[in-house]
């Protein structure tokens, strides 16, 4: 069984990825590697952020003492995710800044990137769109995954990218208690309720992250030794 090391400490992301992939892989996360260095998500695109996180963790794992015991199985890869909300009326914002959208209103922290609370981010979106009618609130969630093999090693540390996009719109007000991030505001195409209302079972079938993970899983399942894995 292939081991995937998720390059995140975000409990919500870990829960979603685990639910979507099921028992297809042995999943570890940075909870199992608390000493792993933090990586600033300061790149201009989702793909570059995901790639940076995957490369950094893969490089760190290469020199990890007792790696054979801490990375079980014959093969292991790092899987990094970066996701964002793109709102057409905001020229694609918040995009790569989704996690820290509200914080951009203030002075940048001296320590680097600082995320905002979900409530503050949602409030800012609604404030900026308050004059926009329902038919002018088109938006999408985008997810980019970067996958890098660490066992057997991939010396170039060149990752494979997989993208998923979920089209929809921004609601007039938040609704639902489930999910995280912008889920209470985002109504996916073909639905009348937000991700936060639809519940994890349906969300994990149609979401941007589900689409990207499905592409990655199919690529791994169809991979023949010596073949180049397709990206996106």
Image (cartoon, helix red, strand yellow):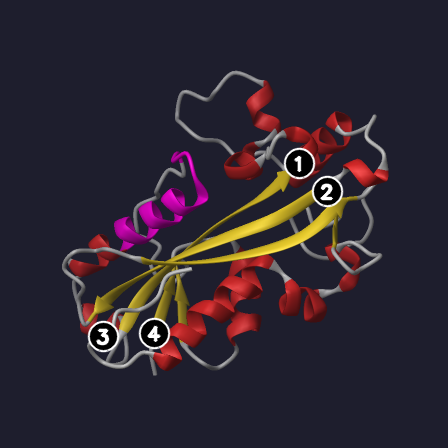
Q: Residues within 10 Å of mark 2 (few under 14, many from 20)?
A: many
Question: In the image, is 149 to the left or to the right of 116?
Answer: left
Judging by the rendered image, the residue that carries numbered circle 1 is 88
Number of other residues with Cα within 10 Å of mark 3, as a class: few under 14, some 14 to 19, many 20 or more:
few
Q: Which mark is residue 3?
A: 4
Toward which corner of the image does residue 171 lie, by quadrant?
top right
Q: Secondary structure at mark 2?
A: strand
Q: Earlier in the sequence, mark 1 or mark 3?
A: 3
- Using the image as rendered, state which of residue 227 and residue 104 is in the foreground: 227
**Residue 103 visible in rendering:** yes
For the point 82% across and 49% down, the residue is 175
Q: Are marks 3 and 4 in contact (CB under 8 Å)?
A: no
Say which mark, if any, is on residue 20: none
Choose the circle earlier in sequence order: 3 or 4. Answer: 4
- Which of pointers 1 and 3 indicates the residue nearer the eye? 1
Q: Secondary structure at mark 3?
A: helix
Q: Are marks 2 and 4 in contact (CB under 8 Å)?
A: no
- Tell me, yes or no, whether the highlighted magenta stretch contains residue 128: no
Q: Residues within 10 Å of mark 1 (few under 14, many from 20)?
A: some
- Numbered label attached to residue 138: 2
> Label 2 to label 4, Cα distance in Å?
38 Å
Q: Residue at x 49, y 66 (%)?
A: 213
Seen in the picture, residue 210 relative to 116 is either above or below; the reply is below
Mark 1, secondary structure of its residue: helix
Q: Residue 7: x percent and y percent? A: 39, 56
In the image, 30 versus 123, the foreground residue is 123
Instruction: Identify the magenta region.
Output: 42-57
Q: Which residue is mark 3?
A: 69
């Amino acid at each position: 069984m292939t081991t995937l090391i998720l390059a995140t400490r975000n409990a919500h992301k870990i829960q979603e990825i685990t639910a979507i992939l099921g028992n297809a892989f042995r999943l570890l996360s940075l909870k199992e590697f608390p000493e792993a260095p933090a990586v600033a998500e300061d790149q201009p695109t989702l793909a570059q952020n995901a790639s940076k996180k995957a490369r950094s963790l893969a490089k760190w794992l290469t020199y990890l003492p007792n790696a054979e015991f801490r990375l079980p199985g014959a093969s292991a890869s790092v899987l990094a995710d970066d996701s964002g909300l793109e709102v057409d009326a905001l020229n694609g914002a918040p995009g790569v800044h989704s996690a820290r959208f509200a914080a951009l209103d203030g002075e940048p922290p001296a320590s680097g990137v600082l995320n905002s609370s979900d409530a503050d981010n949602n409030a800012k979106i609604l404030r900026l769109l308050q004059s926009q009618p329902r038919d002018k609130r088109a938006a999408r969630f985008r997810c980019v995954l970067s996958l890098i093999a660490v066992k057997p090693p991939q010396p170039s540390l060149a990752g494979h990218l997989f993208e998923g996009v979920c089209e929809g719109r921004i609601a007039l007000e938040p609704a639902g208690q489930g999910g995280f991030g912008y889920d209470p505001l985002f109504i996916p195409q073909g639905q009348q309720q937000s991700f936060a209302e639809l519940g994890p079972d349906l969300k994990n079938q149609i979401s941007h992250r589900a689409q990207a993970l499905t592409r990655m899983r199919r690529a791994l399942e169809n991979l023949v030794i010596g073949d180049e894995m397709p990206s996106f």
